[in-house]
Image (cartoon, coloured by chain):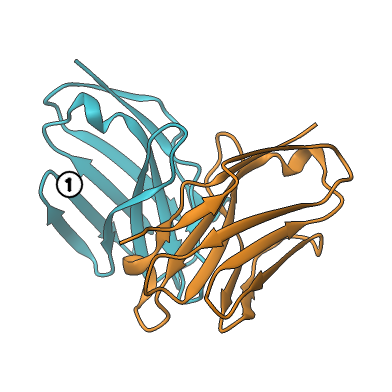
Amino acid sequence: DAGVTQSPTHLIKTRGQQVTLRCSPKSGHDTVSWYQQALGQGPQFIFQYYEEEERQRGNFPDRFSGHQFPNYSSELNVNALLLGDSALYLCASSLASKATALSLHFGNGTRLTVT
Amino acid sequence: QKEVEQNSGPLSVPEGAIASLNCTYSDRGSQSFFWYRQYSGKSPELIMFIYSNGDKEDGRFTAQLNKASQYVSLLIRDSQPSDSATYLCAVNSGTYKYIFGTGTRLKVLA
């Protein structure tokens, strides 16, 4: 039973560039949430996707966008990268019909470094 | 005031002792509370969740919730060196997002 998989594991980009991060949810899950975790901080909610729509968004600028595909996998796109975007990006999948984080499963994350 | 506050630590306890981790939250409408463990360089993994006031025990772990004081804690009995990690407190107010604290780093000394 495959868990949440994220790719790539590490990424180095230059300021101003654009990046796409990918996530495949745990088998049977239909909801994907993205979190940003800066060094020494807790994860910060970016947004959640369900039925290919953004269902809720955290306090992140429009430079952060996403997409969910019919197979429930998801992408996180960040445009015009800033140094402050350097962080661990975590994808978490869950099942919409189940309540709360009982079913919130995190992937291993993508470490993004912006130089 | 931060929405979820934790002491960053490190909290150092000897092997076999009880580790006590604390978390306060600001939203009185918060409904569910979670403790995650995160090893360095790894993703968070759920340890326990609690919804109602009082204690909830699972093996060596006990979560305690006091909604009147807006306080949630995690006790780890018989601490082991393998428990050394960062412990994240997360709160949900009935929406789709979880608000995390900055985490408390626990060191269990052998």
Q: Position of residue A71 (x, y in %)?
A: 53, 76
In the picture, measured across the screen, residue B60 lies left or right of residue A20, that is left
Name the residue rendered at 59%, 35% in the picture.
A39
Kindly indicate which chain is depicted in cyan in the rendered structure.
Answer: B
Amino acid on which disc 1 is placed: Phe
Visible residue check, residue B69? no
Please tell me which residue is depicted at 23% across the width and 29% down the height of the picture.
B82
Kindly indicate the quadrant of the structure image that contains residue B55: bottom left
Which of B95/A55 is in front?
A55
In the image, residue A58 above or below residue B88: below
Residue drawn where x is 25% and y is 37% of the image: B20
Quadrant (top left, top right, bottom left, bottom right) of the C terminus of chain B? top left
Question: What secondary structure is found at the residue carrying circle 1?
Answer: strand
Q: Nearer the viewer, residue A84 or A65?
A: A65
Q: State the residue in front, A113 or B32.
A: A113
Tell me where residue A77 sits by quadrant.
bottom right
In this rendering, is residue A79 above or below B20? below
Q: Position of residue A34 (x, y in %)?
A: 58, 60
Is A8 left or right of B103, judged from the image as shown?
A: right
* Chain represented in orange: A
State the count of labels.
1
Chain where mark 1 sits: B
Neighbour tally class for label 1: few under 14, some 14-19, many 20 plus, Cα within 10 Å: some
Res. A62 visible in picture: yes
Q: Which residue is mark 1?
A: B61
